[in-house]
Image (cartoon, rainbow, N blue to C red):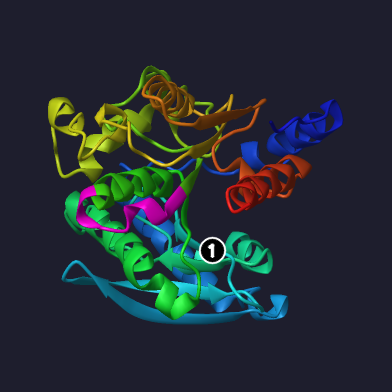
């Protein structure tokens, strides 16, 4: 179990107050803000990725499975890959690209893993099911063809926020669509959204929520799913919390006490454990959404713990 010191928690508290609380909050319901965030994301491509400085190789390509193809960004370790990690980035299903996860994925590759980061299409430009299609395609490719291309057979999922949701949604599909589903050995899920009808903590998110505009979260779920009703959004195909999880691989879930999505991780972990599956829940004191991306000792410890959790499932 991840144990944080009082000094680490205090340091991160100061960072959130001095740095994160001063940032503008993102309200994805406002088209202007959505396009601004996308534009800033595109501008970030100008900055060089740290991958080559890490001594790693990277390749952008399309992979095919299930009669579909999807763009991915593959980061190779320097030696033989110990396993394949399919990484699915966050960004509210609407923004960001695989390249934005290069710092985190580079560390995974340095630990000996081949990382397949998914450049899925964005909602609401594309149907919500299409977004899940892309992630299912990448996971199915890793399970069926990854060993031949990348030299390793065990597969793990690694996702944050919307990417954590898409990770579980893709896994739920692949348990029937992929004959090699048993090669999926685990899921690392950072602060995911697993109920798109909105959990109580999402509905209660206040205006002073860090990172997000709290009151805009629940209404956003309707918009990003193309106007689906609450009942439709409770479908297991949309919200993994309502799915049968009894045959899913082990999961490691992280969420902070200052994150409106805290109920999502709690409820998913509880359901997995109740259905006889291993789910370890790490609740990080005072941490907001996206905490593992910030320059704090808490972020470093959480990311390191995630890598060690994967390591243990290869022994």
Q: Position of residue 158 (x, y in %)?
A: 49, 52
Question: 34 or 202, which lies in front?
Answer: 202
Q: Nearer the viewer, residue 136 or 297?
A: 136
Q: Please report the residue visible at 34 percent of the width from the left and 73 percent of the height from the top.
A: 71
Residue 13 quadrant: top right
Provide the residue span drawn in magenta.
176-185
Name the residue at 19% across, 33% down.
Answer: 233
- Left or right: residue 286 compared with residue 134: right
Q: Is residue 17 above or below residue 161?
A: above
- Given residues 28 and 120, the one toward you in this image is 120
Q: Within the magenta stretch, is there residue 182?
A: yes
* Residue 278 lies in the magenta stretch: no
From the image, tell me which residue sits under label 1: 83
Neighbor class of circle 1 (other Cα within 10 Å; few <14, some 14-19, many 20+) is many
Q: Secondary structure at mark 1?
A: loop
Residue most extreme to the front: 315
Image spot of residue 93 (x, y percent): 34, 51
Q: Is residue 190 above or below residue 195?
A: below
Residue 136: give x, y in percent of width and height: 28, 57
* Position in image of residue 122 (x %, y %): 29, 59
Residue 159: tell me if it is visible: no
Depth check, front residue: 240 or 208: 240
Q: Which residue is at a point 26% across and 58% down the rendered structure image?
A: 179
In this rendering, the answer to whether 158 lies above or below 272 is: below
Q: Residue furthest right?
A: 7
Is residue 195 rendered to the left or right of residue 5?
left
């Amino acid at each position: 179990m991840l144990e944080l010191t009082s000094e680490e928690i205090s340091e991160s508290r100061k960072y959130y107050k001095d740095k994160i609380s001063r940032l503008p909050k993102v309200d994805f319901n406002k088209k202007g803000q959505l396009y601004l965030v996308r534009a800033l994301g595109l501008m970030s491509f100008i900055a060089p990725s740290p991958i080559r400085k890490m001594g790693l190789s990277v390749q952008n390509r399309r992979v095919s499975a299930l009669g579909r193809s999807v763009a991915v960004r593959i980061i190779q370790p320097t030696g033989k890959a110990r396993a394949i990690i399919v990484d699915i980035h966050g960004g509210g299903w609407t923004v960001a690209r695989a390249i934005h996860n290069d710092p985190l994925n580079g560390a995974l590759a340095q630990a000996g893993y081949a990382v397949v980061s998914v450049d899925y299409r964005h909602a609401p430009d594309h149907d919500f099911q299409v977004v899940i299609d892309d992630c299912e395609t990448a996971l199915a490719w890793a399970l069926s063809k990854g060993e031949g291309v990348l030299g390793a057979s065990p597969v793990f999922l690694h996702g944050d926020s919307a990417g954590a949701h898409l990770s579980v949604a893709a896994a739920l599909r692949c348990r029937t669509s992929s004959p090699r589903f048993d090669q999926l050995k685990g899921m690392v899920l950072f602060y995911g959204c697993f109920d798109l009808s909105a959990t109580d903590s999402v509905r209660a998110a206040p205006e002073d929520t860090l990172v997000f505009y709290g009151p805009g979260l629940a209404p956003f779920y309707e918009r990003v799913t193309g106007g689906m009703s609450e009942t439709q959004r409770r479908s297991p195909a949309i919200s993994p919390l309502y799915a049968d999880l009894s045959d899913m691989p082990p999961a490691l879930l992280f969420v902070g006490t200052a994150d409106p999505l805290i109920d999502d991780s709690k409820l998913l972990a509880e359901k997995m454990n109740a259905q006889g599956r291993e789910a370890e829940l790490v609740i990080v004191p005072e941490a907001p959404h996206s905490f593992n991306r910030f320059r704090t000792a808490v972020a470093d410890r959480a990311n390191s713990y995630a890598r060690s959790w994967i390591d243990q499932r290869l022994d």
